[in-house]
Each structure stands twice: as structure tokens, then as C-alpha cells.
Image (cartoon, rainbow, N blue to C red):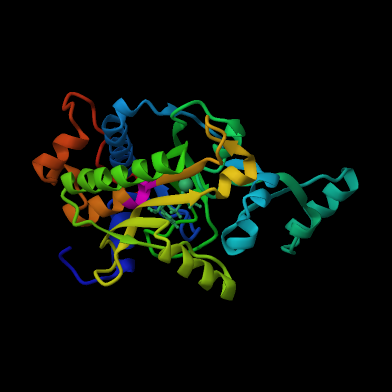
């Protein structure tokens, strides 16, 4: 990084280059073609790295059943981050009343009611219910990529309300799951170092809510259940997590009744690359024009130079 820590200046520079497109929603900016190309290329690099692992690639919509969020304890642990979908269920008269309130500039949201879905808070959540019952020997390995929602509005470009997570999920015996998590921590460090990012790994904790949450976070750290790979993006003092590794022990397996082939309670773990954050880390460390990035980094992300690249022209100023 060549200038002092200044998240607002970084945000404005990204916007001036058309890399991000301000929408008026804090943490809800759009992505320009160059930003998106970097993000997709990094995701493809992850896929090439993991190609021999044989993960099943599954795709889910960015909404999950309300019951799933309730069951996994999300509202007990992270109510401050949850996003709930509401909609209109009324008839003609109620629709008129709704429209009149909107036109008058009055609040109208209390005329909506709760739907059966919530916004997906982590890409891995829809995976666990699939494996209720006995696993095959060796367990399962799944790859998912999804938009996730977290209610943490911020002007800081690395803290988004809606962003993408590329995750791998392992469901197997405790020994298998822990060995997999340890191997991936090493592997992800090497992958990010190969992109010339100054990464470090550390034990971490989730942002559990409230006073009770502080105890849960301390216990999570003590048991070394969560690790993060961090890199300075908007602050040298407080580096940003770009990849997280979570060992859930039997949290999801007990909720969904997942057992190993041998009949033991299964264990689960996931690792997630925050795709926007990796993109922002690359832009921060190598500059706002990917054509000027170090040759080794470019070679890893754009191995096929024949592939057309999106124009670097700024769509907001062209
Ligand atoms: P869970 O433990 O609930 O399964 P998870 O492990 O899949 O969740 P986190 O560890 O909270 O999810 O986040 C995964 C990655 O997503 C982080 O390492 C980070 O890169 C990215 N991320 C998290 N929050 C944000 C945010 N507000 N904006 C952008 N990226 C984020
Ligand atoms: Zn996860």
C-alpha cells in the first residue's frame, strides 16, 4: 500500500475508476466489468486449485427457508446480521392503501407480512440439510458459490451488505474434517501468497451478539474453531479477513441428524473466500489497473491471454 489508511479515499478511487458503482446503498455498490473480471478469474483459480479434490458443485438461490435459519440458531447468535423477506398479501383495498401511503411519502412497511424465506447469510447453510442420515464412507465434499446478505451497512468498501462467498464444505468424521481444514489452511495461504498478497493467518471468532456472545466468541477462540487469512486492505493495523475456516464440530450434524458411515455423529467444516474482499486486496496491493499488475499475478489469473478482457473504460464517465 502506498498511501495512508483511508477507506473513504480508497472507495472514491475505486468509484472514479469505474471498478465499483455507487448505488446509494452503503455496502451495496455495483461492480464494474474489470472488478467482476478479477473476481471471476480468482474464483476460476480456486476451481483449478481444487480440481482434483472431486467436490460436488451445488447451486442454491440467495434465499433460504425461514425454518433453516431458526434451526441452525442464527437468530440466537447473529440477530443483528439477519435479513428477512416480507411481501404484500392483501387484496384490492389493502393494495390501494399501500399505494396511497407510498405516494404520500408515509411509511408503508407495516402493511407487509412475513414470507417463508430469509436472505442466505452464509453460502454453506443450504448444504447441511441435504445430508441428514448416514453419509457414504469418506463423507462428502461440496463446492458452493452464492450471494449472501449481512445487515452491516458501511461506507468502508470491504464491508458489504451483499457479497459473494466461494465455499467448500466438508461433512465427514471429526478426524477427516479436521485434517481437511488444516490442509486447506496451508493451501489457501500458498494460493494467496502466489498472488503476491502479504497474508497472515490467525485464530478468529464470529461476531456473536451481545454479552452472552462475548463468552461464545472467547470459547470459539479457545477451541481454535475458526481461522482467518488476513491482509491489510483499508488498514495496516486492522487487516481484513479474506478467507475463513470454520470447524462447526457437531453443530449442524446434530441439528440435521448427520451420521458417518460407521454411525457416529458427523462433523462439519467449511472454508469461504470472500470474493469481493480478495478482489479489493488485489486492487489495493497491485494497483487499480490490472494491466499493470506483476506478470506472475497476471499469469495466474489470466492464464489464457487470448481470452478477451472487458474494457477498462469507466462506464460512469464514458
Ligand atoms: P459461518 O461460520 O456462519 O458458516 P462463514 O464462515 O461461511 O459463515 P464468515 O467466516 O463470516 O462466513 O465469512 C466468510 C468470508 O466472507 C470472510 O472471510 C470474508 O472474506 C467474507 N466476508 C464476511 N463478511 C463480509 C462483509 N460484510 N463484506 C464482504 N465480505 C465479507
Ligand atoms: Zn460456511
Percent coordinates x, y for residue 91 in the rendering? 88, 43
Q: Is residue 208 left or right of residue 85?
A: left
Q: Quadrant of residue 129?
A: top right
Q: Is residue 291 left or right of residue 229?
A: left
Q: Is residue 296 left or right of residue 136?
A: left
Q: Is residue 32 visible?
A: no
The reply to whether the magenta stretch includes residue 273 is: yes
The N terminus sits in image quarter: bottom left
Percent coordinates x, y for residue 181 in the rendering? 36, 45
Image point (27%, 52%), residue name: 17
In the displayed image of the protein, which residue is found farthest to the bottom? 211
Percent coordinates x, y for residue 200 in the rendering? 24, 59
Q: Quadrant of residue 76?
A: bottom right
Image point (35%, 40%), residue name: 180
In the displayed image of the protein, which residue is found farthest to the right? 93
Q: Nearer the viewer, residue 108 or 315?
A: 108
Percent coordinates x, y for residue 280 in the rendering? 30, 53
Q: Quadrant of residue 270?
A: top left
Q: Nearer the viewer, residue 309 or 44?
A: 44
The reply to whether the magenta stretch includes residue 94 is: no
Q: Nearer the viewer, residue 204 or 112?
A: 204
Tag count in the figure?
0
The C terminus sits in image quarter: top left
In the displayed image of the protein, which residue is found farthest to the left? 295
Q: Is residue 28 visible?
A: yes
What span is in magenta?
Answer: 272-277
Image point (30%, 48%), residue name: 185
Amino acid at each position: 500500500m502506498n498511501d495512508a489508511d483511508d477507506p473513504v479515499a480508497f472507495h472514491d478511487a475505486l468509484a472514479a475508476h469505474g471498478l465499483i458503482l455507487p448505488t446509494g446503498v452503503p455496502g451495496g455498490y455495483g461492480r464494474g466489468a474489470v472488478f467482476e473480471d478479477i473476481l471471476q478469474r480468482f474464483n476460476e483459480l480456486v476451481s483449478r486449485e481444487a480440481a482434483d479434490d472431486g467436490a460436488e458443485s451445488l447451486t442454491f438461490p440467495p434465499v433460504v427457508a425461514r425454518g433453516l435459519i431458526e434451526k441452525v440458531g442464527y437468530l440466537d447468535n447473529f440477530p443483528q446480521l439477519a435479513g428477512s423477506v416480507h411481501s404484500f398479501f392483501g387484496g384490492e383495498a389493502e393494495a390501494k392503501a399501500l399505494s396511497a401511503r407510498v405516494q404520500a411519502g408515509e411509511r408503508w412497511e407495516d402493511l407487509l407480512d412475513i414470507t417463508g424465506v430469509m436472505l442466505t447469510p452464509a453460502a454453506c447453510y443450504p448444504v447441511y440439510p441435504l445430508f441428514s442420515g448416514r453419509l457414504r464412507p469418506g463423507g462428502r465434499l461440496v463446492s458452493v458459490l452464492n450471494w449472501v446478505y449481512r445487515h452491516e451497512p458501511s461506507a468502508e468498501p470491504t464491508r458489504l451488505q451483499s457479497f459473494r462467498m466461494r465455499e467448500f464444505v466438508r461433512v465427514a468424521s471429526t478426524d477427516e474434517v479436521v485434517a481437511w481444514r488444516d490442509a486447506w489452511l496451508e493451501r489457501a495461504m500458498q494460493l494467496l501468497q502466489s498472488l503476491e498478497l502479504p497474508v497472515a493467518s490467525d485464530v478468529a471468532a464470529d461476531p456473536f451478539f451481545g454479552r452472552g456472545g462475548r463468552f461464545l466468541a472467547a470459547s470459539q477462540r479457545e477451541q481454535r474453531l475458526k481461522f482467518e487469512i488476513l491482509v491489510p486492505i483499508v488498514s495496516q493495523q486492522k487487516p481484513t479477513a479474506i478467507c475463513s475456516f470454520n470447524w462447526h464440530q457437531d453443530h449442524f450434524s446434530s441439528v440435521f441428524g448427520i451420521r458417518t458411515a460407521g454411525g457416529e455423529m458427523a462433523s462439519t467444516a467449511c472454508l469461504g473466500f470472500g470474493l469481493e474482499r480478495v478482489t479489493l486486496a488485489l486492487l489495493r496491493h497491485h494497483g487499480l489497473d490490472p494491466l499493470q499488475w506483476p506478470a506472475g499475478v497476471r499469469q495466474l489469473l489470466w492464464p489464457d491471454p487470448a481470452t478477451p478482457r472487458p474494457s477498462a473504460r469507466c462506464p460512469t464517465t464514458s
